[in-house]
Amino acid sequence: MMMFGFGVAAAALPIPQAGAQPVIGDAPPGPPPGPGGLGDPAAAAQPGPGLLFADEFNGPAGAPPDPASWFIVPARETIRNPVEWDKPYNMGRYVTDQQHVFQDGAGNLVIRATRGEGANIQEKYASAKIIGNWRGGVGTTWEARIKLNCLTDGAWPAFWLINDNPVRGGEVDLVEWYGNRDWPSGTTVHARLDGTQFQTNKHPVDGDWHTWRMTWKPEGMYFWKDYQPGMEPFFTVLANSLPEWPFNDPGYTMAPVFNIAVGGSGGREPAGGNYPADMLVDWIRVF
């Protein structure tokens, strides 16, 4: 997602950009489980005592996400020295109301982007972003079941993990799609938050239900789409395969993020898009 405090020329290039978040910190909530093997059984992601963090989003229709688990971001980040598309008037607003982030009563979280009246993208478009209050470190597996009913011009949805330490920040985009139609959708590991050190796997993203999984081990990060037992990862990023690798630092943790941005470098012009546009999250589980 958007780079934290940076608006350098890299933001104009057709590459994924790293994100801007409130400080997540580096202290783990407790010791992580052992890394285990890559072939962790699918049953390990089911609700149960082995989970470190989970949300099934089974609240009543219209309820916000559980505030004990999630922080709803109240405003879009400001980019320092922005390129044109990252200037405030070209980026839709983040809001906290229950028209834009809510549970649907059918077991899903809905993050909704809407179009209204106004003179520019900032005034016309609103959406939402939530950040988990829980953080996990090396030795964890993260998985979420998501449906992207928001693959439209101007929208920029993602499921990602963040540590925005200003010196050793990092980001992992399990799935990200760009409404600018220029940047390829896919999965990316950012070892710096200025967008200068990353590995990415470009792959199509559609509007069907899919699970997106990442196992974070001392040896690296391993990614699956629609994981089944015995399935090989579609993308592997080995530890220290980038010049900087904060993810093995002692006590290093990340928090989960779900959002739809509108406009900005990744979304650009939303005028031709179909709104409202929704991201649905059935569940997230970390074990």
Image: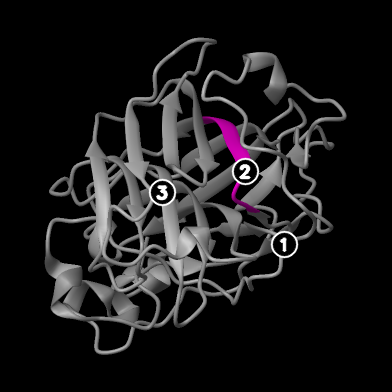
Residue in the image at 40% along x and 76% along y: 4
Q: On screen, 130 above or below 147?
A: below
Marks 1 and 2 sit apart, C-alpha to C-alpha, by: 12 Å
Tell me, yes or no, if residue 31 can be seen here: yes
Q: Which residue is mark 1?
A: 28
Residue 230, given in percent of the width and then of the height, sits at 49, 10
Marks 1 and 3 sit apart, C-alpha to C-alpha, by: 20 Å
- Among numbered discs 1 and 2, the one appearing first in the sequence: 1
Q: Secondary structure at mark 3?
A: strand
Residue in the image at 47% along x and 82% along y: 166
Q: Nearer the viewer, residue 26 or 187?
A: 26
Name the kind of residue labelled 1 in the image: Pro
Q: Which residue is mark 3?
A: 173
Residue in the image at 77% along x and 52% along y: 31
Q: Nearer the viewer, residue 240 or 168?
A: 240
Query: Which quarter of the picture shows residue 13?
Result: bottom left
Marks 2 and 3 sit apart, C-alpha to C-alpha, by: 18 Å
What mark, if any, has residue 139 been given in the picture?
A: 2
Q: In which quadrant is the C terminus drawn?
A: top right
Tell me, yes or no, if residue 127 can be seen here: no
- Label 3 crowd (10 A; few <14 / some 14-19 / many >=20): many
Asked if residue 141 lies in the magenta stretch, the reply is yes
Q: On screen, 49 above or below 103?
A: above
Q: Secondary structure at mark 1?
A: loop
Q: Nearer the viewer, residue 144 or 164?
A: 164
Colouring method of the image: one colour
For the record, the magenta segment spans 137-146
Tell whether 265 sits left or right of 220.
left
Tell whether 160 sits left or right of 176.
right
